[in-house]
Structures are given as C-alpha cells and as structure tokens.
Image (spheres, helix red, strand yellow):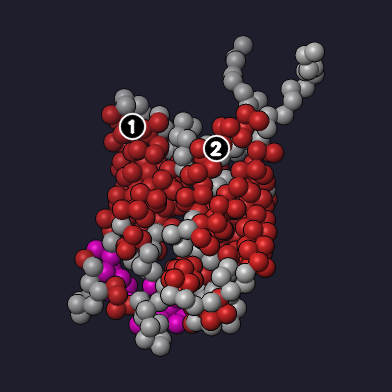
C-alpha cells in the first residue's frame, strides 16, 4: 500500500508537462516582443536559459542529487523564460546573467528547490535587478514602427555584449522616436510626465500611445492574453487568479480615473501596458508560490491587481507586477489557512 500526502486531487499534467505547456504558451508574446523591440528579446532568452541550466546543474551536483532528474522538470527553463521576457531587450548581458543566477540559486534552491520556494523566482530576480540597476532595467527601445533608428542583428548583438555598436553608438542613440525625442514605455512616460506637471489628456497625445492605446504594447499584451487563454483551455492553470487580477486592475483604475481623470490613467492603459497579461497568466499563477484554494486564488489575484494600480498611480515605480506578486506571495499561506474548504463529512464541534 502506498501512502501520499494531500492534496489528493490528481492533475492531468505532470510537472514537466505543465512547465512545457506554460513555456509553449509564451511563444506568441515572445514573437510580439521581437516584432516590436527587436533581436534583444532572443538574446535575453538565450542567456537566461543557458545560465539557468548551468547554475541549476551546479547547485544540484553540490547537493548530491541527480542533475538530469531535476533539470528534466523544466522549472529552471520556465523561470529563465519568464525573467527574459520581462527584461528590456537590449539590457547588458550581465543583467540577464545576474538576475537568472539570483532567481535559481537564491530564490529557488536556497529554500530547497522546486516546491519549497515561497517567492516567485523569476520576479525575485527581476526585483533584485530593478533595485540594483534601475537605469539598465528601465531603458527600453521604442517600438520599431516609431523608432528613428532600429538596430539590426549585428548592432543589437554588439549593444547587448559591449554596450555600443560598430559606429560607437550606445543604446541611447536608438531610444529616439521618429520625431527625435527619447522614448520610454507607456507606463514610464506617464510616471515621468506626471512628475513634470502634465495631465493625462496631454500625455495620451504623445507618440507612444498612438491612435489606439499603446503602440506595440497593446499587441504584446494581447499576445500574452492569447497564450494565457490557451493555458486555461488546456487546464494548465485555473481561471481564478487571472480573472480576479484583471478585474481588480480594471475596477481600481476605473474608480481612480473617475475620481481624477487627469492624474490617473484610464483602465485600458493599465490593462494593455507593461507586463499586465504576462503577470496575470504566467507569473501570478505560479503553482508553488500562489494560493491553492479557489477562494484564496480569487483573493490573491484581486489583491495583486489592486496593489499594481496603487503602485503605478502613486508609487515610485512605473510598473509593479513583480512587487505586487512578491508581496502577495508572503500572504499566500495566511490566505490558504482561512480559505480551506470544509472537509467532507466533518461537523462543527459544539
């Protein structure tokens, strides 16, 4: 007779199959990022995945475990992919290296490996990078459709590894839009413009917002949305966290925008900017660091969405997915404790 611990509900997917499904579902978003922001997306993916496998192999060997067995669950690869997709495409190679090392070695294996980490490893690595290297982590190229000069493959490779191309141009040279102004992401642009005294009606007329929401970024988010819906259909994730997450973002930003429309962005800006859809379907739904009950997942997702809007509107960082997820990772055990369903057949003691 074999004994096992709870939960007893069996999944149709093994751990490795689940990880592979999630990685596969990121492909539309990765392609959209490449289309709008260039070759750096693939460079980040290659470096992050290579460093993740190498560092996990070394740590597992030091722990006297079988590296082949551990690496075959694809959890390190998924962590690397999620971190790579969150990084600016032409951030220096060492940024991706440091972030991945921290995510795998400290955020994952320091706690015992897969299943024991209380925090999302990819977002832990991302926050370390954002706090340590804010300039590198907030320098994004403009979408290629409105860029004054988009780097080709060779120039991108040189910028990624050396910081300048063959002509001596640094990344700053490529951050200009077609009008010759330095570009930022939509959320960066909103945060900076508010600090300079602009109001929302003035900000949304800037080139990065285009005729429909955010140039490039709306398609990136819609691509990750498509991948996320695929995961729900395949039952790789449940709908509770993504739906409550996005609903909370919409409701919170709708109320804030209604209260003061000139100092709070409209809901669609929040939904189709930054890492919103990547966070909703791929990051917040991490089965290890998120809540496990359905009621708890709704609370967990809604709290993340609320925190995201609060930080975006009133905090010091333009985007807040990583911070919000890590904050709620700390609260996940408490939420699970108070949302456990009643055991079938149990009776309340009197």
On the rendered image, what quadrant is the N terminus found in? top right
In the image, residue 316 lies in the stretch drawn in magenta: no
Task: Name which residue lies at 80% across and 13% down.
Answer: 350
Q: Depth-wise, is mark 2 or mark 1 nearer the camera?
A: 2
Distance Cα–Cα, label 2 vs label 1:
29 Å
In this rendered view, identify the residue nearer to me: 143 or 45: 143
| Image coords of residue 228 (percent x, y) | 60, 55
Secondary structure state at the residue bearing disc 2:
helix
Q: Which residue is mark 1?
A: 60
Q: Secondary structure at mark 1?
A: helix
Q: Is residue 158 found inside the magenta-colored segment of the image? A: yes
Q: Is residue 61 visible?
A: yes
x, y percent for residue 254: 66, 64
Instruction: List x then y, in percent, for residue 167.
Output: 20, 80
Q: Which mark is residue 233?
A: none
Q: Say if mark 2 contacts mark 1, CB within 8 Å.
A: no
Report whether 9 appears left or right of 172.
right
Say if 266 sits above or below 323 in the image: below
Q: How many marks?
A: 2
Say above or below: 199 vs 44: below
The disc, 2 or 1, on the residue closer to the chain's N-terminal end is: 1
From what the image shows, is residue 182 above or below residue 33?
A: below
Question: Is 130 or 91 nearer to us in this picture?
Answer: 130
User: What residue is shown with label 2?
Assistant: 331
Q: Residue at x 52, y 70 (%)?
A: 217
Q: Quadrant of residue 65?
A: top left
- Which residue is located at x 32 percent, y 26 percent? 63
Foreground pick, 22 / 91: 91
Span shown in magenta = 141-161
Query: Mark 1 packing: few (<14 Cα in 10 Å), some, or many (20+)?
Result: some
For the point 41% across and 45% down, the residue is: 124
């Amino acid at each position: 007779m074999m004994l096992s611990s709870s939960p007893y509900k069996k999944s149709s997917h093994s751990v490795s199959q689940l990880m592979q499904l999630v990685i596969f579902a990121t492909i539309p978003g990765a392609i959209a990022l490449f289309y709008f922001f260039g070759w750096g997306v693939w460079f980040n993916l290659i470096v992050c995945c290579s460093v993740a496998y190498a560092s996990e192999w070394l740590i597992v060997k030091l722990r006297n475990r079988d590296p082949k067995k551990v690496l075959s669950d694809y959890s390190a690869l998924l962590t690397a992919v999620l971190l790579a997709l969150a990084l600016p495409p032409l951030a220096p190679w060492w940024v991706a290296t440091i972030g991945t090392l921290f995510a795998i070695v400290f955020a994952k294996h320091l706690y015992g490996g897969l299943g024991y980490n209380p925090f999302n490893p990819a977002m832990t690595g991302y926050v370390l990078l954002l706090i340590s290297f804010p300039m590198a982590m907030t320098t994004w190229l403009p979408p290629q459709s409105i860029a004054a000069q988009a780097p080709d493959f060779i120039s991108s490779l040189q910028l990624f590894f050396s910081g300048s191309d063959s002509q001596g141009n640094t990344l700053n040279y490529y951050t200009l839009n077609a009008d010759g102004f330095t570009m930022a992401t939509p959320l960066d642009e909103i945060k900076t413009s508010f600090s300079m005294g602009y109001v929302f009606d003035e900000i949304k007329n800037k080139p990065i917002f285009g005729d429909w929401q955010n140039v490039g970024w709306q398609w990136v988010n819609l691509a990750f949305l498509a991948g996320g819906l695929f995961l729900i259909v395949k039952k790789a994730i449940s709908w509770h966290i993504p739906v409550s997450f996005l609903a909370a973002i919409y409701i919170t930003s709708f109320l804030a925008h209604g209260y003061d429309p000139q100092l709070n962005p409209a809901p669609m800006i929040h939904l189709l900017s930054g890492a919103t859809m990547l966070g909703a379907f791929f990051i917040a739904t991490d089965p290890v660091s998120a809540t496990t009950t359905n009621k708890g997942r709704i609370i967990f997702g809604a709290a993340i969405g609320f925190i995201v809007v609060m930080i975006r509107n009133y905090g010091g960082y333009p985007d807040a997915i990583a911070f919000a997820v890590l904050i709620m990772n700390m609260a996940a055990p408490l939420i699970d404790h108070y949302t456990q369903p009643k055991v079938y057949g149990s009776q309340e003691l009197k």
